[in-house]
Amino acid sequence: AFGLAGVWCRCGKYRARRGAVLLVRADCPSHLSSITMFETLLGDAQCPSLWWMGCAALASYAIWTCLYDMYWHPLSAFPGPKLAAIGNLYEFWLDVVRDGMYIFEIGRMHEKYGPIVRINSRELHIKDPNYYGSIYASGSRKVDKDPVTVRAFNVTTSIAATIDHDLHRTRRAYLARYFSKRSVVGIEPMIHDRISKLCQRLEGFLESGEAVVLDHAFGALTADVISYHMLGEHLDFLDKPDLRTIFSEAFHSVSLIYHPSRLVPGLVACLKKIPNSIVKAVFPPVADLGLLEIETKNRILSYSKNQAKIGFQPAILSALIDPDIPLEERSIDRLVDETIVFLMAGTETSSRVLSVAMFYLLNDAACLRKLREELSQLPFRPDNDYAMSQLENLPYLTAVVHESLRLTFGTAGRLPRVATNETLQYNGFKIPAGTPVSQASYFLHTDPAIFPDPYSFDPERWIKAAQDGVPLTRFLVSFTRGSRQCIGIQLSFTEMYLTLARIVSAFDMELYETTVRDVRMEYIRAVGYPRKPKNCINRRGEVMVKVTGRARPPRSVHGS
């Protein structure tokens, strides 16, 4: 804009005066910056229209962009409010200023405009459970991730943030064998060891009478498990007095800036360039992410120097020394990115599902009783350390796990996919190749046509569906679907089954200062969160309980 104004200034009565200004500047010492010269030009009283020309040019550009987005953009024919079609200002207002509320506005758009809506200038959202598999495709169909969503985390070389379909498949293959069912069965003894440690801590809470935050307790468990699997040793979070983990804190730090960094390009990259001491003073939560990155890098470097002393080769260490993996794919920076994602996701997702499951079980005595009765039919084991192969066939335990997954949603927000080489078709519309398209798990999991009374906890719905031959699990998308499905799904299920079976069989608990509002999603950052109580700024919807006793062994255990 200022360039155009400068050209204009050359072409009128200001040409001579402007030339004089430039001659004066030419006589100035060479160390004076061009910025100073520009400021002199702007300050020239003989060119009063320069600022107005700049503002007019910017305003013209803004108006043209709005008109283009609304009427001439390739997506202009798709239904949706015109305000939402203009850039991402509407989304910014509801997701950044109003903190994660855009998902609910998208729901209102669908009520008004139908199953397909344009939710910003470049993205479509489809609310149709039967079309989910077309968006989140598997097999040979090439589906990229959306760069705008990926940049929110700034771990660009990790599997989760890899945009290109082919590169993602290659990177996923490096680690896939460590998360196969066979591999997870092999670490079940380690998982039981960590659950035993958790039981010891719960015994301590029983004796002291103190309340325990289950999100912290289960987070410490899952953090120890994933750190052992990725780095070769658990980090003893279950020994920490408050059971808090840096992985969970870092995850919540990411969630705080998820929407701003998604909608403001370069925000996370700028934050990473600021010294962590300054970030901690200005915005303490975000500093946890920097500390996690530093600690992870130090551990990987330490392990790389002491490979021979480690009893087995965990996932990241194996990648570090595998000669079949290209050198650039096992650089320290990439392995740090990969490890951070696994540590945060592997800690937070399973632990929250476990907490929500325990809330609903403790909130409904009939559900808890049914689960205990089913577990009592298993062959007696003093520590209740049953194998996954025994537990995964129990219909009511499976129903509890599925219902808990449904009501925690996984990544509840949008995870757009981009079909790069094909034109998708939906409901008479042709979706141009390269268009980000999404369908949030929130809408599938709360669809009353699939899950009647969707906000109630009802494990029986899964049992009835199985009896009727209805594939209800088709609509359970907490781990998404297709070629980008969460690589850790088998490990997560194993943690949930083994932990629930042991905790439910071993302890009596009661809810403490926790209501359904603490587990019901009211806004979305990276995942869904309940609204914080106004009088308790340190709570973020955690489930708190008091351990009141040891569960009595069922009669069938003693053969009576």
Image (cartoon, grey):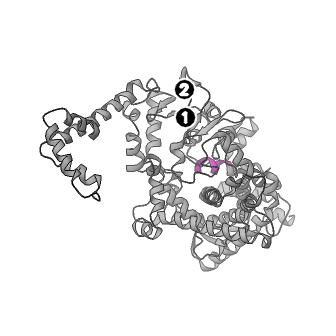
What residue does disc 1 label? 437
Quadrant where the image shows the N terminus:
top left
User: Which residue is outermost to the front?
Assistant: 27
**Most foreground residue, 330 or 482:** 330
Q: Amino acid at mark 2?
A: Ile
188 in relation to 20, above or below = below
The region drawn magenta spans: 402-409
Q: How many other residues sit within 10 Å of disc 2, few (<14), some (14-19) or many (≥20)?
A: some
Say whether residue 194 is magenta: no
> Would you call the spot at circle 1 few (<14 residues within 10 Å), some (14-19), or many (20 or more)?
many
Task: Tell me the amino acid under the disc marked 1.
Answer: Val
| Image position, residue 489 (x, y; %) | 70, 50
Please give the count of numbered marks on the rendered protein.
2
The answer, for residue 511, to whether it is visible in the render is no
Residue at x 71% of width, y 65% of height: 231
Side (left or right) of 62 relative to 363: left
Q: Secondary structure at mark 2?
A: strand
Residue for badge 2: 431
Of all residues, the one furthest to the bottom in this rendering is 208
* Residue appearing at x 65%, y 46% in the figure: 479
Q: Is residue 353 left or right of residue 373?
A: left
The disc, 2 or 1, on the residue closer to the chain's N-terminal end is: 2
Mark 2–mark 1 CB contact (< 8 Å): yes
Report helix, strand or loop for mark 1: strand
Give residue 109's quadrant in the image: top left
Image quadrant in which the C terminus is located:
bottom right
